[in-house]
Amino acid sequence: DAKTTQPTSMDCAEGRAANLPCNHSTISGNEYVYWYRQIHSQGPQYIIHGLKNNETNEMASLIITEDRKSSTLILPHATLRDTAVYYCIVSGIRSNDYKLSFGAGTTVTVRA
Amino acid sequence: GAGVSQSPSNKVTEKGKDVELRCDPISGHTALYWYRQSLGQGLEFLIYFQGNSAPDKSGLPSDRFSAERTGGSVSTLTIQRTQQEDSAVYLCASSFLDRGNIQYFGAGTRLSVL
């Protein structure tokens, strides 16, 4: 019952922006879009989340389309330490669905 | 430390033995979650606590798995009569439900059942 679709992998050059797409065409009105990443052998790390407005924090920017059926995570200046598996997750705080359903994610490799 | 702490970091056990995995969440976090990640697989939800009660146990794979949380803080995941297919990394996360439910994860316990 995957709620999101992401590319399996992508490469990015160090210092360039990395744009990670995610499709969530069945998202409901009370579900948020969350992005986490997992660096090898570590626990997942929260990056950013949003409902319908674009969001930015010190790690990344999140662009959500007006119909909310897709989003893009932007890492503005990728570094080698950004190499990780990136997960796009939809979760409904307001519908008492608190757990995160992790799919396969996108394996991002940042190359020097 | 300010993060989620899990112990032990590694556990090797023999098939049929019972194991207990511990999670110390971030102080004050009301929600606590257990997930597991088998080799090369994604994260699989196991159980969720709100305070000391578990409204969602839907991810526990069998009745050999149980978990409790006491004092709204520490949680223990117990696996009885371990099997080789229980080998995985068990991850704990905690969050404030009323602050966006941003889940903070521990480093996990790597369980190996021989």
Image: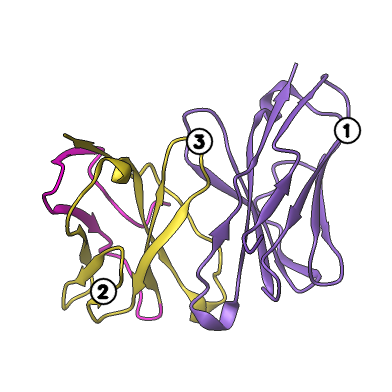
| Same-subunit check for callouts 1 and 3 | no
The span from disc 1 to disc 3 (Cα, nearest Å) is 25 Å
* Residue A60 locus on image (x, y percent): 26, 64
Q: List the residue tagged with mark 3.
A: A41
Q: Earlier in the sequence, mark 2 or mark 3?
A: 3
The residue at the point 45 percent across, 50 percent down is A102
Q: Secondary structure at mark 1?
A: loop
As shown in the figure, which amino acid type bears the numbered disc 2? Thr
* Residue B102 locus on image (x, y percent): 50, 69
Q: Is residue A6 left or right of residue B64?
A: left
Q: Secondary structure at mark 3?
A: loop
Q: Main secondary structure of the magenta part?
A: loop
Q: List the residue tagged with mark 1.
A: B18
User: Which stretch appears magenta?
Assistant: A1-30
As shown in the figure, which amino acid type bears the numbered disc 3? Ser
The residue at the point 71 percent across, 48 percent down is B6
- Say whether residue A106 is visible: no
Using the image as rendered, state which of residue B7 and residue B79 is in the foreground. Answer: B7
Q: List the residue tagged with mark 2.
A: A56
